[in-house]
Amino acid sequence: MFSLEDKRQFIVENLNDLGAWLELDLSRHVRSVENHSGLRESFERAVAPVDFFKTKHWDNLLWLAGLYRTCLYAIARELAPEHTVETGVLHGISSAFVLQGLIDGGNQGTLHSIDYPSTFEDGPVNEDGYTDTLPPNLTSGWIIDESLRSCWSLKQGPSSDLLPQVLGVHDQIDWFIHDSDHSYANMAQEFEQAWPAIRSGGILLADNIDTNTAFFDFCRRVDKVPYVLPADPDHLKPLDAGIRVGLIVK
C-alpha cells in the first residue's frame, strides 16, 4: 500500500530536484499544502451540496494535491508571478492551488483562466477523449472559494479564440499553464501562441504531456531542454508510472 509518508517523500524529492533546476525553493511548501486547513475546508464546503462529490473528504490535502498541484502552489509562492495564464479549469481544483499560492505568497499577482466548459447538460467538448463534465447547473471553477476570487479572472470559450485576447492585454506574462484539451492540435496551438508572450525567465508548464508528442515537438522547435515530472504513484500505479508534467524556461 502506498502510504501518506510515501506520497510525502515522493513529492518532496521531486520538488527538491525541480527547485534546483528552476533555482526556486519549492519543497519547503509541501508542509504548507499538507497542513492547509483553510483550503481543505473550502473544498469540503464546496462539494458538500454536490451529489457526485459530497462524500469527498480529505484527511490530508496531499492526497488531493499530489505532485502536480503541490508544484503549482509552490511555484505560485516562489515565482511571485504578476500575470499567470491558464487554459483548462473545469471544477477549478488546480486553479485553487495556484490562487492559494499567490495569496499565501503575499504578492499581487493574477491568475487569468480560460476554460471551454464541458457541461453536464451538453456533454464533453474535449477532442482528446476526456469525458468528465461539470456537475449539473454549475460553471467553470465552481469549487474555488470566494476568498480566492479577488486575484482570479475567468473567460469561457475555446482557447483558440480567447488565448490571443488574454495574452494581448499584457506586455508579458510570467507563467503559462496548459491543462485544457490535450489533443495535439490544441496543445501545439497554445504553446505557439503563449511562448512569445512569456517574459525572459518565465515558465511554460504543460500537464498530461504523455498524451502525444506536442510538448516535446515544441521544445525542439524553440531549442529548449524540458524538465519532466512523473505521474503520481498510488496503490494502483507503481513508482515508474510514467511522465505527466513538462516545464521549460524562456
Image (cartoon, rainbow, N blue to C red):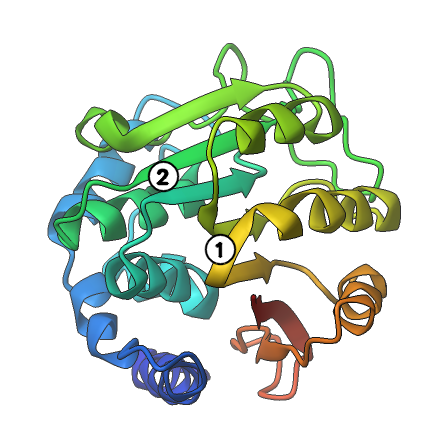
Q: Give the class, few, some or many, for how many residues have Cα within 10 Å of label 1's Cα (few <14, many ≥20).
A: some
Q: Residue at x 44, y 70 (%)?
A: 67
Q: Which of the 4 image quadrants contains residue 29?
A: bottom left
Q: Is residue 156 left or right of residue 160?
A: left
Relative to 222, say whether 56 is above or below: above
Q: Is residue 5 left or right of residue 197?
A: left
Q: Give the class, few, some or many, for how many residues have Cα within 10 Å of label 2's Cα (few <14, many ≥20).
A: few
**Looking at the image, which is closer to me, 173 or 86?**
173
Which mark's residue is nearer the viewer, 1 or 2? 1
Q: Residue at x 24, y 48 (%)?
A: 102
Relative to 176, say whether 20 is above or below: below
Relative to 53, say whether 19 is above or below: below
Whether residue 167 can be seen here: yes
Q: Position of residue 171 (x, y in %)?
A: 47, 38
Identify the mark nearer the N-term, 1 or 2: 2
Q: Is residue 165 left or right of residue 108?
A: right
Q: State the separation of the CA atoms marked 1 and 2.
A: 42 Å
Q: Position of residue 54 (x, y in %)?
A: 36, 32
Disc 1 marks a residue whose amino acid type is: Arg
Q: What residue would you read off at disc 2?
A: 55
**Looking at the image, which is closer to me, 25 or 38?**
25
Q: Tag 1's secondary structure?
A: strand
Q: Position of residue 182 (x, y in %)?
A: 76, 48
Instruction: Identify the disc placed on residue 199.
Output: 1
Q: Which of the 4 image quadrants contains residue 63?
A: bottom left
**Looking at the image, which is closer to me, 40 or 163?**
163
Disc 2 marks a residue whose amino acid type is: Thr
